[in-house]
Structures are given as C-alpha cells and as structure tokens.
Image: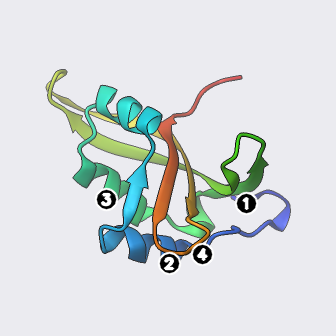
Amino acid sequence: MARHGQSPINDLAEFQRLVKEGRFSINRKSRLEADALEYSTDEIVDCLMSLRVEKHFDHSKKFDDGEGEADIYFVRWHHFMPSRDENVAHDLYIKLRINPSGGAALVLSFHPERNG
C-alpha cells in the first residue's frame, strides 16, 4: 500500500511496544473524534496493535505545524457503537510517531478518512 516504495519513518514494532506498555498519548482533538465515534481507549489500542506496515502504511509526511514527521496509516476498523446498537465499520486515518526522545508513542490523528 505504501506510495512509491516509501518506508515508515517510525518503527511500527517499537510504536506498538510503547502502546502495549501504556506509554502513549492521544492528542486532544483525536481523543474527541474517537469519543464521538464511541471508541474506548482499549478499542483504540486494539486498532493500533492491529496495524501492519505491509497492509496499512500509506506514506510519511513532514508537517509544518510543529508535529515534525509522522507516518500515515489507513485501516478499516469494525466496532460496536452502543448509541446505534450495532456494529459499524470506519475507514480510519491514523497519523502516528514516536516521541523524539523515544519515551512515548504519539497518536496525532485518529478519525475517519476525510474526502478533500
């Protein structure tokens, strides 16, 4: 799925190790968007742990908003939404990176894909 043979900047296995150890943070905007979709923290963790470079990685990108370089993943994720009393599928856009000091995994975006 990666564009032009590009590889992730961040080591996904290391990112997932940090997540598994509970050493991760989700920025406020992403947490609010996940809350609106009724994702629990455990569901976010499960989704992050399911990511595979060969299947979900799209590209890496340098951002001008102070976030530095991050990796972009796309994944279709199914989960139960209590308010709708049904299972739903979301095509998620996930932007992630490892803190430059190496101490934490950072989730910079976690939301449905947006057109345009």
User: Is 74 on the left or on the right of 82, as rendered?
Assistant: right
Q: Which residue is mark 2?
A: 14
Q: Residue at x 56, y 65 (%)?
A: 99
Disc 4 + disc 1, Cβ < 8 Å: no
Report crowding for label 3: few under 14, some 14 to 19, many 20 or more residues within 10 A (C-alpha).
some
* On screen, residue 92 above or below 59: above
Amino acid type of disc 3? Answer: Asp
Q: Nearer the viewer, mark 4 or mark 1?
A: 4
Report crowding for label 4: few under 14, some 14 to 19, many 20 or more residues within 10 A (C-alpha).
some
Amino acid type of disc 1? Answer: Ala
Real-space Cα distance between discs 3 and 1? Answer: 22 Å
Q: Secondary structure at mark 3?
A: helix
Amino acid type of disc 4? Answer: Asp
Amino acid type of disc 2? Answer: Glu
Disc 1 + disc 2, Cβ < 8 Å: no
Image quadrant in which the C terminus is located: top right
Upstream in sequence: badge 1 or badge 2: 1
Report crowding for label 1: few under 14, some 14 to 19, many 20 or more residues within 10 A (C-alpha).
some
Q: In the image, which disc is placed on residue 46?
A: 3
Image quadrant in which the N terminus is located: bottom right
Along the line of sight, the residue nearer the viewer: 41 or 81: 41
Disc 4 + disc 3, Cβ < 8 Å: no
Real-space Cα distance between discs 3 and 2? Answer: 15 Å
Q: Which residue is mark 1?
A: 2
* On screen, residue 10 above or below 77: below
Q: Residue at x 66, y 56 (%)?
A: 70
Upstream in sequence: badge 3 or badge 2: 2
Q: In the image, which disc is placed on residue 11?
A: 4
